[in-house]
Amino acid sequence: DKRLFSSILQQKEEIVMDMKIVDNME
């Protein structure tokens, strides 16, 4: 299902953003 795929991609992007924020804090 493409909707599921797009939602997974969105979650990955959010995780990447969180990781970048954590990297900036260090």
Image: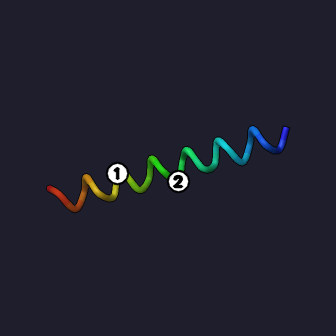
* Residue at 55% across, 44% down: 11
Seen in the picture, residue 24 relative to 5 is either above or below; the reply is below
Local SS, label 1:
helix
- Neighbor class of circle 2 (other Cα within 10 Å; few <14, some 14-19, many 20+) is few
Say left or right for 18 vs 24. Answer: right
Q: How many numbered dots are placed on residues in this image?
A: 2
Which amino acid, by three-letter code, is at mark 1?
Met
Q: Name the image colouring.
A: rainbow
Residue furthest to the right? 1
Say left or right for 13 vs 8. Answer: left
> Horizontal and vertical percent for residue 3?
79, 43
* Residue at 29% across, 57% down: 21
Seen in the picture, residue 7 relative to 17 is either above or below; the reply is above
> Gap between marks 1 and 2, in whole Å?
10 Å
Q: Which residue, given by chain and number where applicable, does mark 2 sit on? A: 13
Which amino acid, by three-letter code, is at mark 2?
Glu
Say left or right for 12 vs 7. Answer: left
Question: Residue 8 — which label?
Answer: none
Q: Residue 20 is drawn in which quadrant?
A: bottom left
Seen in the picture, residue 10 relative to 1 is either above or below; the reply is below
Which quarter of the figure is the N terminus placed in?
A: top right
Q: Which residue, given by chain and number where applicable, does mark 1 sit on? A: 19
- Neighbor class of circle 1 (other Cα within 10 Å; few <14, some 14-19, many 20+) is few
Local SS, label 2:
helix
Mark 1 and mark 2 residues within 8 Å of each other at the beta carbon: no
Which quarter of the figure is the C terminus placed in?
A: bottom left
* Residue at 75% across, 38% down: 4
Residue furthest to the bottom? 24
> Horizontal and vertical percent for residue 24?
22, 62
Sequence-first tag of 1 and 2: 2
